[in-house]
Image (spheres, helix red, strand yellow):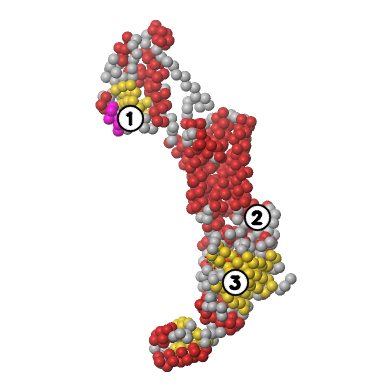
Amino acid sequence: MSSLAIEVQGLVKRFGDRTAVDHVSMRVESGEIAGFLGPNGSGKTTTMRVICGLLTPDEGRGTVLGLDIRRDSERLKREIGYMTQRFSLYEDLTVEENLRFVAGLYGIHSITARVQEQLEALGLTERRNQLAGTLSGGWKQRLALSACVMHRPKVLLLDEPTAGVDPKARRAFWREIHRLSLEGMTVLVSTHYMDEAERCHRINYISLGKLIVSGTVEEVIARAALTTYLVKGGRIEEAENLLRAHPDVDQVAPFGATLHVVGRDAQKLNTAVMAVASATGSRAERSETSLEDAFIRFIGGTGDTQA
Amino acid sequence: MSFSLSRLRSILRKEAIQMRRDRVTFAMMLGIPLMLLILFGFAINTDPKRLSAALVSPAQDRYTRAIVTALELTGYYRFTYPNATASEAERLIARGEVYFVVTIPSDFGSRVERGDTPRILIEADATDPAVASGAISTLRTVAAQALLHERDAENQAAEAARGSLQVIVHRRYNPEGITQYNIVPGLLGVILQMTMVMMTSIALTREIERGTMENLLAMPTTPLEIMLGKILPFFGVGAVQVLVILFAAKVLFGVPFIGSFGLLLAGILIFVLAMVLIGYTISTFSRTQMQAMQLAFFFFLPSILLSGFMFPFGGMPRWAQLLGEVLPLTHFLRLVRAIMLKGAQAPDVARPILALVVIVLAYAVVALLRFRRTLD
Ligand SMILES: Nc1ncnc2c1ncn2[C@@H]1O[C@H](COP(=O)(O)OP(=O)(O)OP(=O)(O)O)[C@@H](O)[C@H]1O
Ligand SMILES: [Mg+2]
């Protein structure tokens, strides 16, 4: 068996005449934390559902831990932990009842002990008798995570686990993900947050159902081949308008009083930015291209074969 | 993956907790049977008694009094206007204040004494045919007997031979024609049908609507376990409802129970199984609880109208009878009425039981086939 935990090739999933996943091939190494990014409706959830056997692909093949995602889906259910995008435990059950239910379905032997252990590990002990529906967003996510790792899966699929969660809770959540990864779990996690993407070993970027790019953060940024300038001071609103209208500038994004200016052609961008800066009395300096800049470039250039 | 009892237990425990917490649904499970029992058992009466009537009798002699007393004794008539004029009576019946106008002409007494055929005019408000039919059917015999009584004893024999034509009405199994005897056992079927189909169809659709189905399917369970987990709790609910209805039948309505209790329970079990499977099938067609409800009502309507619950099955046109034969409620009603009211034994009810078993098997197959193992 290879060291690949997840390997899918040419996956296609259609809903009617809409192709939600379009020939996606993706590999995730054992023990790795793989990020899964892409705009809304790009097919992240659908891909994850196909991987864990909840949807049957129309085309393509895939294995998880060497097991076929079509044929062995029942066996895979015991090896995969899947945390859905929408909270999908029972809101009218308490925290503890939910965990006991899940433990029962996985046939865990000493349910009480394991549930106790999970409650402590995620700091849910005090809320054990609270109805899941009355938990705040952050606690719901913790409960969901704890339910899907209850059976000690080897592969964890997390679908936007930190959507709508405050920064502190997000950080705690990611500490937990790293701990699980150190225990040997392979994690595929989808997210819209750039800082979370940067915490992953590798990231996969999908747009309109097609996998656009995958690699480490540095590789992905390099693939975008962008040049970035920061422009500040002077008549900044005027500078923004001029830059937006300029054909050699691809993106202009204000961050407070600073403009983030991105372009594909370093030479032309340099000329453009310098001209605008001197005309508006602003200062311009080269900067690192961020992951977000790279992604915005990928979204804009989905139809572009160069991307 | 094979069937696992411990997984089924987990699902059952979860369902039980949810059922207990869902106050509204829980209230509905007991509320619906009680409401229907009270409505159908007490309020609705297809053989109404003590209907208001007006009497127009200028003479007001002893013959009139005899007839009025006799009519009132039948229980159908209640003379709220015992001494009305013809025009008053006309207004009363037009306004719906009385259902009947009984007119006894002034020459009534003299005709009786002369031996001529005496005449009484009864006008009935027949806008609702059911209202009038019972009252009218008893009329002739009652009036004739009342007259006989009033005549001289010596003339009695001759008069009896010549005049009164006697109508023999022999109502079997329910000699007094008490509506409740027919309705209350029927209600057993209607109530079980309503609650079982509705609750089961909602229970599964709720998982889909709330998104919990996605999680449930991602965990190792089999369709059979999920299905049984959803279905079995409703057997408990059904058992409670059966007890409530049978208790009410006995204590509130005094419906006789002359058949075998065990046989009735067996029939109920098969019927409930059919209902629950239908509910389950409905849920596999619905995406939201609202849709499930609508589909359930779509199924209730023909069931109530065509099963012989509301209208006598034999009186329906052929096509309606054919449709009725497909409905489980039709067979269940035959079964319950036969066992409770006629004391039928197993061989007597073999046909409805067989029909119910066939329906159960058919829906079990459909339900298992329709179960989605994936979210597609
Ligand atoms: N069950 C379904 N039936 C029909 N279309 C669907 C279904 N599920 C998803 N889609 C469509 O497939 C596409 C991909 O959806 P998907 O949920 O996988 O996107 P996503 O990347 O997870 O988006 P988000 O970031 O908003 O969660 C969307 O256009 C969506 O409308
Ligand atoms: Mg999604």
Picture layout, residue A286 above or below residue B86:
below
Residue B369 horizontal side relative to residue B153, left or right: right
Residue A34 visible somewhere in the drawing: yes
Tell me the tag on residue B98: 1
The CA span between labels 1 and 2 is 65 Å
Q: Are marks 3 and 1 on the same chain?
A: no
Q: Position of residue A140 (x, y in %)?
A: 55, 66
Q: Nearer the viewer, residue B316 or A216?
A: B316
Residue that badge 3 annotates? A189
Is most of the magenta stretch helix, strand or loop? helix
Quadrant of the image occupied by residue B96: top left
Mark-to-mark CA distance, 2 and 3: 27 Å
Q: Residue at x 61, y 36 (%)?
A: B353
Amino acid tagged 3: Val
Quadrant showing the C terminus of chain B: bottom right
Magenta segment: B89-95
Report whether the residue tagged 1 is closer than 8 Å to ligand 1. Answer: no
Magenta span includes B90: yes
- Marks 3 and 1, how far apart at CA: 78 Å
